Amino acid sequence: ALALQAIDTAGIALRPERQYEWNEFARPGATRADFVITMDESVQNMTPRWVGQPDTALWAYPDLVGGATGEEDPLKAANAMLMSLRRRLEILASLPMRDPDRAALRFDVRDLAHLH
């Protein structure tokens, strides 16, 4: 609910779409991903083997519901998290995905975890 409030506050329109289980992307014939980005450290070791073995990154965020943000106002924490994720995604979208130096790209995506 906090995430939805933050998205609404930011003026981002959500299109109602069905939720996907990550196992759908691990099945033979599934769409191949270039990167899989996990946002919760506790589930990182539970992820399936992805089709094509894409690069992975962890962009861990604190638990909003559990109050792990250190922020007294949960909505303020959710808004800050949304803005942080937005910055990371904007930078990710600007990276040269077809760069022949795949290792450099992998490090760039993983380094975005340290951006606040």
Image (spheres, rainbow, N blue to C red):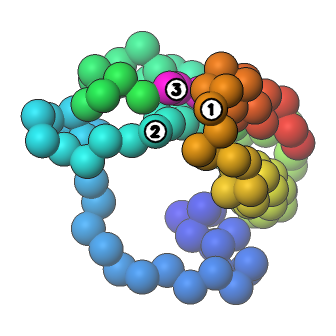
* Dot 1 or dot 3, earlier in sequence: 3
CA neighbours of label 3 inside 10 A, class few (<14), some (14 to 19), many (20+)? some
Q: Amino acid at mark 2?
A: Asp
Q: Residue reaching furthest front?
A: 100
Tell me where residue 35 appears, x and y as whole percent. Answer: 50, 36
Q: Nearer the viewer, mark 2 or mark 1?
A: 1
The magenta segment is 55-59
Viewer-nearest residue: 93 or 80? 93
CA neighbours of label 2 inside 10 A, class few (<14), some (14 to 19), many (20+)? few
Image vertical order of residue 78 relative to residue 12, above or below:
above
Q: Residue at x 42, y 82 (%)?
A: 15
* Dot 2 or dot 1, earlier in sequence: 2
Name the residue tied to disc 1. 100
Whether residue 99 is visible here, answered yes or no, is yes
Residue 34 got which mark? 2
Q: Residue at x 73, y 25 (%)?
A: 104
Dominant secondary structure (helix, strand or loop) of the stretch shown in magenta: strand
Viewer-nearest residue: 23 or 43? 23
Q: Amino acid at mark 1?
A: Pro
Callout 3–callout 2 Cβ contact below 8 Å: no
Q: Residue at x 54, y 64 (%)?
A: 1
CA neighbours of label 1 inside 10 A, class few (<14), some (14 to 19), many (20+)? few
Q: Nearer the viewer, mark 3 or mark 2?
A: 2
Tell me where residue 77 appears, x and y as whole percent. Answer: 80, 53
Q: Residue reaching furthest left?
A: 28
* C-alpha span from label 1 to label 3: 18 Å
Residue 110 got which mark? none
Q: Nearer the viewer, mark 1 or mark 3?
A: 1
